[in-house]
Image: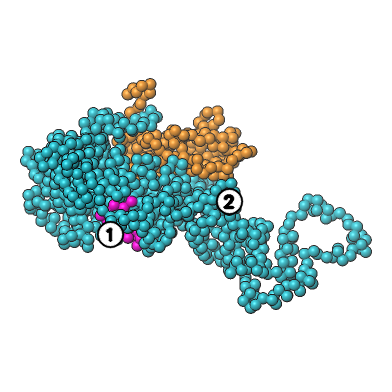
Chain colours: A cyan, B orange
């Protein structure tokens, strides 16, 4: 409708306004001068909406163009039978395993690659030799010095004793943190075939305080006990995939794990007085649990509150015992990609049942926690309840939890995830008190690490390659879960305004960067993707569309291995929205969001009425400031005033006045319009042309709140596609029946705009945080005077009545 | 004291404070955010300075040679003294003659989301520029990032200060051909 105005009979004239500084342009000129950078200029046109097909891998039988597993999708299966013994006196492990490898790929394999992540701790490992030194001034922490020396002396890493198959030795080659096992030359593993082989090994567990890692042991000097958190402790198969072949990129300590699903039978032999927590279900409770513990465990399955299995008093008694006897705990786990465990005689243990439709058997998941007395009372209050909360919340946003147990263990590791079990570090003070930070730190880390059961333990992404696919997605759902814990939960990521300082910074790489090459690891792989997904949910797609698409992604890739393109494609496929621009900007670039409302002009309809035009023109003329000369010349005596007969028609004529012909032309024009056009011509209201600059480069929706003179407001939410033909600058014509007195871009902080000082029109002077604090703290003059008077009286001075505190000040009575 | 080639390290106990907080768990993010505004008529920089509580505790612990707990120090009313001394050491502003400008403590806010420290730096009205150096977190982190916003009148610029580029010359007066500040420096 507006276009018709412009192209036929009606023009809009820019109004001079105190609020909106006038420009001389008319609307018809400015609307068609839409793109001042994009259309013409030295730089090539930046197409922020160019489709991603040229970047994403070509769809095939394994992975479809819609982002789902294809009809030919395959993944390997690896089952393990493991027996391991812990030597509590030497902190060593000795293990034997039988591996059954099922080749479901269409390829013939002549060798298999296994991961030996523990070799990270060997002297001369790539992690150590490639670590760089940033000169730390003149201070070096004791902890750092201690670790430096300990790492040099610690003889960590796998000691492989045998690799055999059917009693025959197999050739193997250790390549740093990887091991290649050569299959017999006469027995390559064809498509659909399986093989079995055995590995025997031993290694020393790292003492975490000196040699930190994702697992390790903690020694308690006051009672002489250890807590062991044991992970990547057995040689396990690398993933062989349709996208990368063998994923055997060396483990440098940051890019985590890429693994195959399989079934595990694990026998863990420990001192008899130890309590063991592990991935999977305990198969021999009658052998290793006291009757009272078994009875409590049965009660916990149906309890809506955590129930102590091992009470604090029992744990205290237990930690002072010593025995030479051993016990073997037997665990079984189906369809997991890893196996981890923890053991100590210090453990308190509690449990609570949680119903999950996806859990086999009676549909009860046991949420459990294990911690030493040093974790009390914080852990009994929050750990297992946070586990249950995670199962509920993630079940809603992704899928129901399918495993029989979900475990949180306190020990030396600050926060690390494995299937069904995770290690979490926060503890209270020695006196049992704790700060709010510690409390929420524990709840958050439990939610985060238990949440990893979904990403990547079940939605099995390639962690070694793409950290964001598990950490970013998990941090996002963690944020959603935290918001369901309590009002004003102090989440440290998720809100767009929390990421702006990182987004504006220079030390960045795109989210789509290999794990080992990421700069600013936390913001890049955790906070930015989590924030991007929150923005996608709240602002781009809306909760309903996003939640459907996100659940669909989780459903499609449950117990399968997605790649980034599968996520991007599924989110578009299921939401029905083209998001290529969003992935391009947020995941493939380091641009940031900075949209400026750079100019606003108000226009009125020019109906062509010559009298109305004359009135506007005269108003404008009256507003023009006279020049200095003109002002001074006003006082000069004028000839025409002294000799009136010199004045004629032209002295009375105002060239802004319409002529008779002008009026006739207008009447003729009105008469030529049909009724509909005459109604349009009579439209009352306000027209505004707004200029928006995209200063950050990242295209995002323009979310505009328009405040009316009567105090009400209206919204105009312009999708990101407004930038498609002009990514750096756009103009927008807005019609409003009411006068608009203020425009604000993104007032609710939805887009992570790094500079909100240019988001308002008219501009507002931004008040600094310093000033807000100081103003709130400063006393007013009356308070100051009263204080001075009080001081004077207290010191016995007599000057209190002569000005320091006026009697009528109203204070100090 | 441990000799290391020609350099000398002082061993401190920053590691004594356990990592136990929001946002700084497994993959810690060591950063500060600083808003600096030049108030020309008073010749001062008004500074609002933010950092994570665990980072502040670790820094204060490293400096004090004993574990510093913000909650306890706050109760004991010794915290302001520690903060004033620390911020003077790490947030240094020098005049063109190389002399350090004095600080005036204004206050602090401690929340779960972070610590805000407020202070003024007396830069005077004589110099056309001063040099800011942020040495916070260098005791406890290899690569801290200090995102600093400088506001002078209507001009506003943002810069990331790092270990290798810890200094920034702040122009207190507009140069005749002053460039528009670059947001991504």
Measured as percent of width and height from the top left, residue A690 is found at 58, 58
Which residue is at a point 26% across and 53% down the rendered structure image? Answer: A74
Give the residue pinned by disc 1: A399
Whether residues under marks 2 and 1 lie with C-beta atoms below 8 angstroms apart, the answer is: no
The quadrant in which the N terminus of chain A is found is: bottom right
Q: Which residues are magenta?
A: A547-563
Q: State the image quarter where residue A127 is shown.
A: top left
Asked if residue A481 can be seen in this view, the reply is: no
Question: Does the magenta-highlighted stretch encompass residue A552?
Answer: yes
| A804 vs A292: above or below | above
Label number found at residue A37: 2
Horizontal side, residue A204 vs residue B43: left or right: left
Q: Decide: few, some or many residues near mark 1? Use Cα within 10 Å; few <14, some 14-19, many ≥20.
A: many
Q: State the image quarter where residue B60 is shown.
A: top left
Which residue is at a point 60% across and 66% down the rendered structure image? Answer: A3
Q: Decide: few, some or many residues near mark 2? Use Cα within 10 Å; few <14, some 14-19, many ≥20.
A: some
Q: Secondary structure at mark 1?
A: loop
- Provide the chain ID for the residue under circle 1: A
Give the number of the mark in front: 2 or 1. 2
Which residue is at a point 14% across and 51% down the rendered structure image? Answer: A332
Asked if residue B11 can be seen in this view, the reply is: yes
Question: Does the magenta-highlighted stretch encompass residue A410?
Answer: no
Measured as percent of width and height from the top left, residue B157 is found at 53, 43
Q: State the image quarter where residue A117 is shown.
A: top left
| A248 vs A75: above or below | above
Which residue is at a point 49% across and 45% down the rendered structure image? Answer: A770
**Camera-side residue: A91 or A306?**
A91
């Amino acid at each position: 409708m507006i276009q018709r105005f412009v192209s036929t009979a009606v023009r809009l004239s820019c109004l001079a306004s105190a609020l909106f500084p006038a420009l001389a342009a008319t609307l018809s000129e400015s609307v068609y001068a839409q793109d001042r950078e994009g259309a013409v200029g030295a730089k090539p046109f930046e197409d922020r909406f160019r489709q991603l097909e040229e970047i994403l891998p070509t769809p095939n039988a394994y992975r479809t163009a819609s982002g789902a597993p294809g009809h030919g999708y395959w993944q390997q299966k690896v089952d393990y039978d493991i027996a391991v013994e812990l030597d509590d006196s030497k902190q060593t492990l000795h293990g034997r395993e039988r591996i059954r490898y099922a080749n479901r790929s269409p390829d013939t394999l002549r060798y298999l690659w296994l991961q030996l992540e523990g070799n990270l701790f060997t002297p001369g490992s790539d992690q150590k030799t490639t670590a760089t030194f940033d000169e730390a001034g003149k201070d070096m922490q004791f902890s750092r010095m201690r670790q430096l020396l300990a790492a040099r002396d610690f003889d960590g890493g796998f000691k492989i004793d045998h690799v055999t198959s059917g009693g025959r030795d197999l050739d193997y080659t250790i390549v740093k943190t990887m091991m290649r096992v050569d299959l017999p030359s006469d027995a390559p593993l064809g498509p659909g075939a399986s093989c079995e082989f055995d590995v025997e090994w031993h290694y020393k567990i790292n003492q975490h305080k000196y040699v930190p890692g994702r697992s390790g042991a903690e020694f308690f000097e006051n009672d002489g006990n250890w807590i062991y958190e044991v992970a990547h402790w057995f040689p396990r198969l690398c993933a062989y995939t349709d996208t990368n072949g063998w994923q055997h990129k060396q483990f440098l300590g940051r890019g985590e794990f890429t693994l195959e699903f399989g079934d595990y039978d694990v026998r863990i032999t420990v001192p008899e007085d130890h309590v063991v927590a592990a991935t999977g279900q305990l198969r021999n409770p009658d052998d290793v649990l006291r009757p009272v513990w078994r009875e409590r465990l049965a009660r916990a399955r149906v309890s809506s509150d955590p129930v102590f299995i091992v009470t604090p008093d029992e744990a205290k008694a237990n930690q002072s015992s010593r025995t030479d006897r051993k016990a073997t705990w037997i665990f079984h786990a189906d369809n997991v990609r890893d196996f981890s465990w923890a053991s100590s005689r210090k453990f308190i243990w509690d449990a609570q049942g949680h119903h999950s439709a996806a859990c086999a058997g009676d549909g009860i998941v046991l949420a459990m926690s294990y911690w030493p007395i040093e974790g009390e009372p914080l852990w009994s209050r929050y750990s297992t309840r946070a586990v249950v909360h995670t199962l509920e919340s993630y079940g809603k946003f992704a899928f129901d939890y399918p495993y029989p147990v979900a475990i949180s263990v306190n020990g030396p590791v600050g926060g690390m995830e494995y299937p069904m079990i995770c290690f979490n570090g926060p503890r209270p003070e020695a006196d049992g008190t704790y700060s709010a930070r510690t409390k929420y730190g524990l709840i958050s880390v439990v939610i985060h690490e238990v949440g990893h059961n979904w990403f990547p333990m079940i939605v099995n992404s390639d962690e070694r390659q793409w950290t964001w696919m598990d950490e970013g997605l998990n941090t996002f759902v963690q944020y959603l879960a935290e918001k369901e814990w309590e009002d004003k939960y102090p989440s440290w990521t998720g809100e767009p305004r929390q990421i702006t300082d990182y987004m504006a910074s220079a030390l960045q790489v795109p989210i789509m960067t290999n794990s080992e090459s990421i700069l600013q690891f936390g913001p890049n792989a955790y906070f930015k993707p989590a924030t991007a997904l929150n923005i996608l949910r709240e602002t781009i797609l809306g909760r309903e569309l996003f939640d459907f698409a996100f659940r669909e992604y989780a459903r499609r890739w449950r117990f399968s291995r997605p790649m980034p393109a599968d996520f991007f494609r599924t989110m578009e496929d299921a939401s029905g929205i083209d998001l290529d621009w969003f992935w391009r900007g947020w995941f493939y670039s380091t641009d940031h969001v900075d949209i400026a409302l750079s100019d606003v002009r108000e226009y009125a309809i020019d109906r062509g009425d010559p009298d109305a035009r004359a009135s506007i023109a005269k108003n404008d003329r009256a507003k023009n400031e006279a020049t200095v000369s003109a002002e001074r010349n006003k006082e000069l005596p004028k000839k025409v005033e002294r000799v009136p007969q010199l004045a004629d028609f032209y002295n009375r004529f105002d060239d802004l006045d319409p002529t008779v012909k002008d009026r006739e032309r207008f009447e003729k024009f009105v008469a030529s319009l049909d009724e509909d056009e005459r109604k349009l011509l009579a439209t009352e209201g306000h027209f505004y042309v707004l200029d928006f600059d995209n200063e950050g480069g990242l295209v995002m929706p323009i979310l505009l709140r328009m405040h009316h003179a009567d105090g009400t407001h209206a919204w105009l939410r312009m999708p990101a596609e407004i930038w498609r033909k002009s990514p750096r600058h756009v103009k927008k014509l807005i019609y409003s029946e009411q006068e608009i007195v203020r425009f604000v871009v993104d007032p609710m902080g939805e887009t992570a705009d790094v500079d909100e000082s240019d988001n308002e029109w008219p501009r507002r002077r931004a008040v600094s945080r310093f000033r807000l604090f100081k103003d709130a703290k400063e006393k007013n003059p009356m308070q100051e005077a009263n204080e001075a008077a009080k001081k004077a009286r207290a010191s016995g001075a007599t000057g209190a009545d002569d000005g320091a505190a006026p009697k009528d000040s109203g204070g100090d009575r | 004291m441990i000799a290391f080639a020609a350099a000398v390290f002082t061993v401190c106990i920053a590691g004594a404070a356990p990592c136990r907080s929001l946002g700084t768990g497994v993959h810690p993010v060591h950063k500060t955010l600083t808003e600096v505004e030049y108030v020309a008529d008073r010749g001062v920089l008004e500074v609002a300075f933010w950092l994570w509580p665990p980072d502040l505790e670790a820094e204060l612990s490293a400096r004090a040679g004993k574990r510093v707990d913000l909650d306890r120090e706050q109760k004991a009313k010794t915290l302001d003294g520690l903060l004033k001394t620390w911020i003077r050491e790490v947030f240094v502003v020098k005049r063109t003659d190389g002399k350090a400008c004095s600080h005036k403590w204004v206050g602090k806010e401690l929340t779960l989301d972070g610590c805000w420290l407020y202070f003024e730096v007396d830069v005077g009205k004589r110099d056309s520029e001063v040099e800011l150096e942020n040495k916070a977190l260098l005791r406890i982190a290899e690569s801290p990032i200090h995102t600093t916003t400088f506001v002078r009148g209507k001009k506003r610029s943002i810069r990331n200060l790092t270990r290798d580029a810890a200094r920034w010359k702040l122009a207190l007066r507009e140069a005749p051909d002053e460039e528009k500040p670059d947001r991504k420096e």
